[in-house]
Amino acid sequence: MSIEDEIRKVSNIFGAIGNPIRFKILMLVNETERPLHIKAVAKILKKDYAAIYRHVKVLEKNGLIRIYEVGRSRVLYAKNADLVKQLVETAKTMILK
C-alpha cells in the first residue's frame, strides 16, 4: 500500500468519526458489553432508523464497526473493540486538554 493510500484511508476514518452522530454511535457500541440493535441506537439517540442506518454504513465502510443480521434485525458491534475503545478514549482526552 502506498503512502497516498494510507493517508486516504486514515483521512476517511477521521472523516467518519468526525460526525457527531457517528461518534455517538461508536461510543454507544464501545460502552456496551453486548452488540446493539440499530433500532436501539436510533431510540437512544432519538433519531430516525434510516438516518442511523446511513451513519452506521459509513462506520462499517471504514472498518470501525460490523453489522450482522439476527432474524430481521441488524446488530452492531465494534470490529476491533480494543482499537475503537482507544480511539474514543484518545478523542475524549483531546477535548480535556
Image (cartoon, helix red, strand yellow):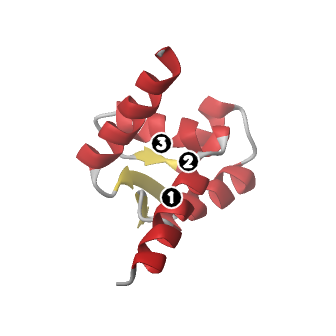
Q: Where in the figure is residue 7, as x and y percent of width and height?
A: 48, 68
Identify the disc placed on residue 72.
none
Gap between marks 1 and 3 measured at Cα? 12 Å
Residue lying furthest bottom: 1
Judged left or right of residue 67, residue 44 is right
Which sits earlier in the primary sequence, circle 3 or circle 2? 2
The residue identified by callout 2 is: 17
Q: Residue at x 37, y 30 (%)?
A: 89
Which residue is disc 1 drawn over? 13
Q: Secondary structure at mark 1?
A: helix
Distance from disc 1 to disc 2, alpha carbons, whole Å, reads 6 Å
- Disc 3 marks which residue? 26
Q: Is residue 18 left or right of residue 74?
A: right
Kind of residue at badge 1: Ile
Dot 2: what SS?
Answer: helix
* The one of 2 and 48 positioned closer to us in this rendering: 2
Residue 94: x and y, percent? 46, 26
Depicted 45 relative to depicted 48: above or below: above
Mark 1 touching mark 2, by CB under 8 A? Answer: yes
Residue 88 x/y as whole percent = 41, 35
| Residue 69 picture quarter | bottom left
